[in-house]
Amino acid sequence: MDTMQLGGNIELNGFNELERSKLVVVKKIVGNYAKEFSDKTRFDKLSLTLALDGTEFKIAAELFGDKPVKSELKDKNLFFVIGNIMENIKKEL
């Protein structure tokens, strides 16, 4: 599975198959949440893994740091899934 690095501490796995326009939006969403997380806690890495499950996007996210947090969701709308996963992580911080 291809891994993409954003900055020094964000890792996107399996996102290389996305259209370029969707990937730009994904990077923006994840980057904004990562900045929010760094304001709340120290973390070493934020890792998101994308898998297709039929017509649904399945994403597993893990925040490694002072307070490790995991979240996993799937839905037909990629941006909805990412937003909800990031909100789940934010609530745990």
Image (cartoon, rainbow, N blue to C red):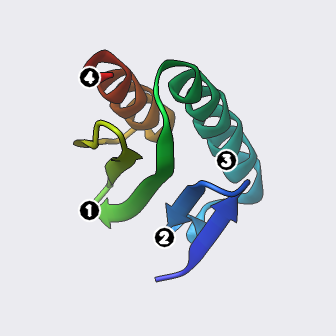
Instruction: Say which label, 1 or 3, has the lower sequence index.
Output: 3
Mark 1 and 4 residues: CB-CB less than 8 Å, in contact?
A: no
- Residue that carries the numbered disc 4 in the rendered image: 92
- 47 over 32 or under it: above or below: below
User: Do labels 3 and 4 touch, CB within 8 Å?
Assistant: no
SS assignment at label 4: helix
4 or 2: mark nearer the eye: 4
Q: Nearer the viewer, mark 1 or mark 2?
A: 2
Can you identify the residue that label 2 sits on? 14
Q: Residues within 10 Å of mark 1 (few under 14, many from 20)?
A: few
Label 4 neighbourhood size at 10 Å, few (<14), some (14-19), many (20+)?
few
Mark earlier in primary sequence (1, 4): 1
Circle 3 SS class: helix
Q: Left of 17 or right of it: where is 90?
A: left
In this view, the residue in front, 67 or 89, is: 67
Q: Earlier in the sequence, mark 1 or mark 2?
A: 2
Q: Which mark is residue 54?
A: 1
Q: Amino acid at mark 2?
A: Gly
Amino acid at circle 1 = Gly
Q: Amino acid at mark 3?
A: Lys
Relative to residue 80, is residue 88 drawn left or right?
Answer: left
Name the residue carrying label 3. 22
Determine whether label 3 and label 2 are within 8 Å by CB.
Answer: no
**Residue 87 position in % (x across, y down):** 38, 21
Label 1 to label 3: alpha-carbon separation = 19 Å
- Give how far across and how far down residue 50 sits, in percent: 40, 60
Query: What is the count of numbered marks?
Result: 4
Quarter placement of the C terminus: top left
